[in-house]
Image (tube, rainbow, N blue to C red):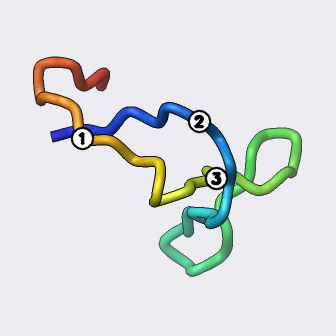
Amino acid sequence: MGFHVPAMKPAHAILRFNPDDSLKRRQTGKLLYARVDNELLKKIPPQEIIN
């Protein structure tokens, strides 16, 4: 199952970590993250998921 986000009002950030527990960064040096507002997540059928 996947999710569709109908509006973006970020409330939470998802950070990714390397195996050594350091934060993952983009090639530019900026943190690799995603902003999420869980209240706006809407379930979508599995066939609509983009991998």
Image location of residue 19, percent across then percent down: 48, 72
* Vertical arrangement, residue 20 with respect to residue 36, above or below: below
Rounded to the nearest angstrom, the CA distance separating label 2 from label 3 is: 12 Å
| Count of marks overlaid on the render | 3
Circle 2 residues within 10 Å: few <14, some 14–19, many ≥20 = few
Q: What element carries label 1?
A: strand
Indicate which disc residue 7 carries: 2
Rounded to the nearest angstrom, the CA distance separating label 3 from label 1 is: 17 Å
Question: Which image quadrant for residue 48?
Answer: top left
- Tell me which numbered mark, 2 or 3, is placed earlier along the sequence: 2
Indicate which disc residue 35 carries: 3
Q: What residue type is labelled 2?
A: Ala
Q: Is residue 41 left or right of residue 21?
A: left
Rounded to the nearest angstrom, the CA distance separating label 2 from label 1 is: 14 Å
Image location of residue 23, percent across then percent down: 67, 69
In the image as oriented, which residue stretches furthest toward the bottom? 21
Q: Mark 1 points at which residue?
A: 43
Q: Residue at x 59, y 35 (%)?
A: 7
Front-lying residue, 49 or 38: 38
Q: In this view, does 45 lie to the left or right of 51?
A: left
Q: What element carries label 2?
A: loop
Circle 3 residues within 10 Å: few <14, some 14–19, many ≥20 = few
Quarter of the picture containing the C terminus is top left
Front-lying residue, 18 or 37: 37
Decide: marks 2, 1 in contact (CB < 8 A)? Answer: no
Q: Which residue is drawn at 86% across and 50% down?
A: 29
Question: Which image quadrant for residue 36?
Answer: bottom right
Circle 1 residues within 10 Å: few <14, some 14–19, many ≥20 = few
Decide: marks 2, 3 in contact (CB < 8 A)? Answer: no
Q: Which amino acid does label 3 sit on?
A: Arg
Q: Which residue is drawn at 55% across and 67% down?
A: 18
